[in-house]
Image: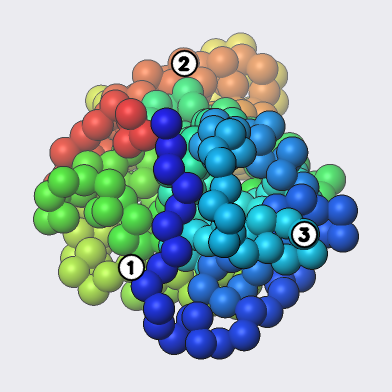
Amino acid sequence: MLQAPMRPEIGSDEKRPAIRSEIWHSDGSVVLQVGNVQFKGPLEHSLLHSSFFRELQLLKQPPDQPTVDGCPVVELSDDLTDVEYLLKALYNPSVALPFPYIASFVRLGRKYEFKRLYDVALERLAFENPTTLKEYDALVAALRAEAPVNPRKFIAHSTTRIVEYPGVPRKWTPNPSALCIPPSIVGLPGMSDELVHLFKGISRPDGTTSLLPCEDHSICVIGRERLLKMQCQLENGPFGWITTWKPNNGCEDVHKCQTWRNTISASMLLTPSVWAFVAVPFITDQLCRICAERVGQAMMPAREKMWETLPSSFGVPNVECVGK
């Protein structure tokens, strides 16, 4: 049986008057307090999602239990921001939540047994940080489908990707010096066509900048160089076909296919970037039916093999799933 949260030792928080947060429902039945900040909401919402609060309701409250507006006050020792994010999700659910919300769901969802929110957070992290090429292609397809309809939703959705928050993968491994992370997280920082993003960072929608630790710069540069060489290898590279390719026998539009091949070749030469994991339809849709089939057959198995080499290319161990 769970025990009611103990009152914290007398300190600076108890000396300060309690203040009400923006989460204050007049019909609320419980007040949660973090430090000197109070949140009031319907206990029923918490009971629906958390076995912790269901058991807490069964506990007999002490006679000196503090109350606000006739509602019992439950003091929590958690981070104020985590609690605020969790309550906003419970009382004002949103379709697309940025990474800090997801991180709070993981921390408090586990502690207070908000199983549904915890599972949703893990599913979101797993979806946006795929460990297989098939999952990665599905993610890209989903984001591309959302972007034209609702660009803002696309931005909010994409901000949960761990690669934008350096340091998170390290916290998930017992040995901070060993990066045990999914292939997609390993590779993405080194795939940019402009190294300036690697060293100066990438701006997030909230105005902050995502920066990799300095010690990771050399890892990404070396790994990126390996991938650039690998993708155009004649035998195993996803774009090995481009160096010797000519329109196939039966090509339905030689000029169109040859022009597209030249365009790709020039782009790879002028702005070196890792094209290996670009969605295959992006390449084949600009070719005739016959050539598209041939190129697709060459690219698919080569992309799969190259995906498997991502961790070793960046000098880190591979894992099946960081969330397991």
Residue 121 falls left or right of residue 133 = right
Residue 137, horizontal then vertical, whole percent: 53, 30
**Disc 2 marks which residue?**
297
Q: Nearer the viewer, residue 135 or 87?
A: 87
Label 2, label 1: how far apart the Cα atoms are = 36 Å
Q: Nearer the viewer, residue 189 or 281?
A: 189
Res. 128 visible in picture: no
Res. 213 visible in picture: yes
Q: Amino acid at mark 3?
A: Gly
Q: Nearer the viewer, residue 323 or 66?
A: 66
Q: Amino acid at mark 1?
A: Leu
Q: Given the current orientation, which residue lies at the most extreme top position?
A: 250
Q: Which mark is residue 119?
A: none
Residue 120: quadrant of the picture: top right
Q: Nearer the viewer, residue 186 or 174?
A: 174
Circle 3 packing at 10 Å, graded few (<14), some (14-19), many (20+), is: few
Quadrant housing the N terminus = top left
| Residue 153 against residue 230 in the figure, above or below | below
Element type where label 2 sits in the image: helix
Circle 2 packing at 10 Å, graded few (<14), some (14-19), many (20+), is: few
How many numbered dots are placed on residues in this image?
Answer: 3
**Disc 1 marks which residue?**
212
**Disc 3 marks which residue?**
70
